[in-house]
Amino acid sequence: MPTANPAFNNPAFQDQSAVRSYPGGQGAASIGGQSQTAAAQAQAQAAAVNAQLEGQFAAPPAGAVETDRMTVEDTVMKTLGLFAVLVVTAVVGWVWSLGGVVADPQGSVTIVPWMVGLVGGFVLAMIVSFSKKVRPALILAYAAFEGLFVGGISAFFEIMYPGIVLQATLATLAVVGVTLALFASGKIRASKRATKIWMIAIIGYLVFQVINVILMWTGVVSAEYTFGLYSAKIMGIPLGLVIGVFVVIMAAYSLVMDFDFIQQGVRNRAPRKYGWLGGFGIMVTVVWLYIEILRIIAIARN
């Protein structure tokens, strides 16, 4: 409708978009409908996103299987599985070794399972340690052979020193438990300097063991020395007790390195299969620790 007021001749009042958007204008109804539809769509999308996020938060966290990454929990399960295999075959080795004694009280303990487990375990340990691939089947086989070795040698020592297996088992569990607690609390950690010292000490100990075996085989060491140079006394104290204390410390630090390997693997998101290597390392160290404690107690009771 034309008007005589010149103020309304301003272009701002003649803007057709402004006229259409005015609530009372011709296009007001359609604009309101479009804005309401857009708002409804935005609310629906927001609700869908919120529902998806709530579902993700409510779902259990992805485990090692879903992520194919190494985790502490998965490594613990693998380690327990390896020790379960070891315990089962250890029982077989124990029964096999004492079969002659059970049948005849005057019979002797056979060392066949002991030697079979020792040779088989050593060969598999070398393959697993130097292989470029993680081979779970070989690690499980190693646990089986180690069980034969542990069961056989335990039966042999139990006949000579009744009750020694229980003593050695409890002592081994105590060392492992204390080491794990100290590592979990952050009081002990693997360091480059300590690892170098450990490497030098372990090489020296291996050389000592080789020399001791040669001296025992050649008869240079008196037959009265049941454990060879370990049975030799210094100021009335068996050398094996002194060496044994240092070896237990070395084995405990080896456990620290095993725990550190697992921790680093989890932190670096290593593939899940490396959990088998973590369990393998712990099992090797625990068996070594048990054998050393078994010998220390035997020397002390001899």
Image (cartoon, grey):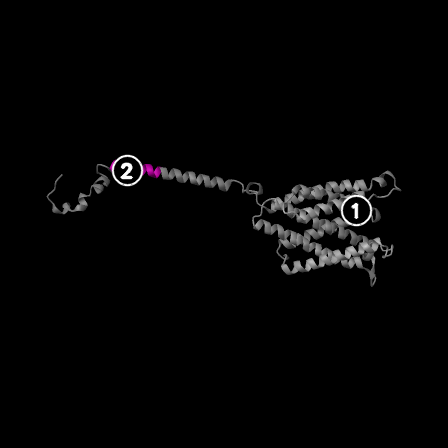
Q: Which residue is mark 2?
A: 32
- Which label number is shown at residue 153? 1
Q: Is residue 125 magenta?
A: no
Q: Amino acid at mark 1?
A: Ile
Give the x, y percent position of residue 87: 73, 42
Q: Position of residue 292 (x, y in %)?
A: 76, 53
Residues at circles 1 and 2 in contact by the CB criterion of under 8 Å: no
Image position, residue 39 (x, y; %) = 34, 39
Horizontal relation, residue 13 to residue 241: left or right: left
Crowdedness of circle 1 by 10 Å Cα count: few (<14), some, many (20+)?
many
Residue at the image point whose x is 74% and y is 41% from the top: 89
The quadrant in which residue 302 appears is bottom right
Q: Quadrant of residue 79?
A: top right
Q: Quadrant of residue 248?
A: bottom right
**SS assignment at label 1:** helix
Residue ranking furthest to the left: 4
Image coords of residue 106 (percent x, y): 89, 42
Residue 226 in view here: no
Prevailing SS of the magenta stretch: helix
Q: Residue at x 74, y 57 (%)?
A: 205
What stretch of residues is rendered in magenta?
28-40
